[in-house]
Image (cartoon, rainbow, N blue to C red):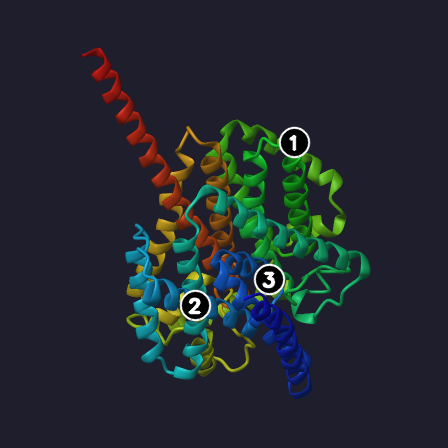
Amino acid sequence: MVERKSRINVVLPMILSLAVIVLYRYLELKFAVALIVGIIGFVLVNYNIKIGILGATFLMPFMPDKIGLAMMLSLSVFFFIKYVLIEPKPLKATIFGAIIGVYFIIACIATFTSISLSGSIRDIGLHMGGLSYAFVVINTIETKEDLNTLLTVLMVSATLVALYGVLQYFTGVEIAREWMDVESSPDISARVYSVFGNPNILAEYLVILCPIGVGMMWQTKSIKKKPIFFLGAVSMLIALILTMSRGGWLGIAFAALVFVLLVDRRLLLLAIPIVIAAFFLLPTSILNRITSIGNMADSSIKHRFDILNVTFNVIRDNWVAGVGFGYLPFKMVFETYNRYINMYHVHNTYLQTMGELGIPAFTIFATMLFTFIKYPILKLVKRKDDTYYRYVGAGIVAGLVGILSQGFFESILYLPRIIFIFWTVVGIMIAMVNIASKDNDIELNSIDQSVVVKRGNRK
C-alpha cells in the first residue's frame, strides 16, 4: 500500500505536468489556463461542491462571459449528475419555484417562436446558466453558516471590483463618446467601469450588491468585521458615484429609502442633513450630472426618448406574443420601424420585456419580480427575533428594489454578467428564506417540546 501511494505521488504530478505542457503547446494561453483551472476546479468540486459555489461566486465578475457561463453550467451539470442521478438528495421545494418555472417556460416558448431563433438562443442560454446556478445554490446552501460564508465571499469580490473602479478614476480612463454628452457635461473627466467595460453596467452591479454590504455591516456585532464590511460598502458607494450613471444613482437612492423603511424609519431624519451636506461636499461635475436628469437638451436623454417612441409602436403591433425572447429579435424588429436610430436595447427593462414577450407574458414577469420583494420581507425582514435575517434580508430586498428601479432607465437583463449576478442574488435570497423557515420550525418545535415537558412535570 505504501509503495502504491508513493507511485501515485510520483506518477500523478508527472501526468499533470505533461498535460499542462500539451495544453500550453496546442491551445492559446487563456484557454489553456481556463482548462487547467477547470480541471483543478472539478477536483475541488468533487470533494465539496460548496467550494465550487464559493469560487464561482467570487470569480463571476472577473470571468469573460463565455467562460462564466461555462463555469455555471458545468457546476449545474455536476450537481445534477452527482446529487440527482448518482447520490439522490431531496431537492428544495420553494414558494418561488412555480412562478419562476412558469416564466422560464414562457421564455422558452418565446425563444422557439421568435423571429430570430439564433438571437433568442443567446439570451435563453444566459438565463438558463443563471437560473441553473441559482438552483444549485438553493439546494446546496443549507445552514446560516454556509450562507454567511457565501455572502462574505460575494462582498469581498464586489469590494475588489469597486476598488479597481476607484483606482481607474485616479489613473484615468477614456470616456467613450456614446457614454456622455460632452457639451452638457464638459467638466466630467472620467466614468469608471472597473472590469465591466461600461460604467452603466458597473452601476447595475453595485446597485444590487451595495445594500447587501450595508446589511452585512449592520447585522454583525464583531468589532473586527463591522469596519471591514463598512469599508466594503463605502468603496462600492464611491465607485457607484464615479460611474456617473444617473440611472445607478436613482437606483441606489430607492434602495437606500427601502432599507431605511425596513430597518428603522427614524433614519429618514438623516436624509435632510445628508442632502444639504452633499450640495456642499460633492464636486461640481457630479452636481451638474444630477441636475441634468430630465434635461431634454442632453443628447443621451433625447436619444433614449427617441428609442422609447419607436418601442411603443413595436409593443402596440406585437402586444399578444411579442417578437421573441432576447434583445436581438427586438433589435431586428425595431430597425424595420426606424433604421436611423442606433440601438441595441430599450433603456427600460419593462418595455423591453413587453416587446419581447407580449403584455400577457409580461404580467407573469412582473408577478415574479413582485414575489422576489414580497416574500423576503414577510419571511426575513419581519423576523424580530433574528437580526441576521432581518438586516441582511433588508439589504437583499433593498438591492433588488434598487436594480429593479434602475430597470426603468436601463435594460438590466441584457448583458451576461448582470444576468448572472441577478439570478445569483435571487438564489441566495431563496436559500435564506428556506434556511430561516427551517430555523423557525426548529425553534417552534423546541418550544412545543418544552411546553409538553413542563406540563408533564406538573402532573
Kind of residue indicated by mark 2:
Phe
Residue 177's image quarter? bottom right
Q: Foreground: 165 or 273?
A: 165
Q: CA distance from mark 1 to mark 3?
A: 28 Å
Percent from the top left, x then y, of residue 446? 31, 28
Verify CB contact (< 8 Å) between mark 2 and mark 3. no
Q: Residue furthest right?
A: 171
Percent from the top left, x then y, of residue 187? 77, 57
Please report the residue visible at 48 percent of the width from the left and 80 percent of the height from the top. Answer: 338
Which badge, 1 or 3, is on the more N-terminal residue?
3
**Which of pointers 2 and 1 indicates the residue nearer the eye?**
2
Q: Is residue 306 visible?
A: no
At numbered mark 2, what does the secondary structure look like: helix, strand or loop?
helix
At numbered mark 1, what does the secondary structure look like: helix, strand or loop?
loop
Kind of residue indicated by mark 3:
Leu
Residue 323's image quarter? bottom left
Kind of residue indicated by mark 1:
Ile
Percent from the top left, x then y, of residue 372? 39, 50
Label at residue 78: 2
Q: Residue furthest top?
A: 458
Q: Is residue 291 above or below residue 365?
A: above
Label at residue 223: 1
Mark 3 is surrounded, within 10 Å at the Cα level, by few (under 14), some (14 to 19) or many (20 or more) other residues, namely some
Q: Is residue 356 visible?
A: yes
Please give the residue where the numbered disc 3 appears in the rendered image. Answer: 59
Verify CB contact (< 8 Å) between mark 2 and mark 1. no
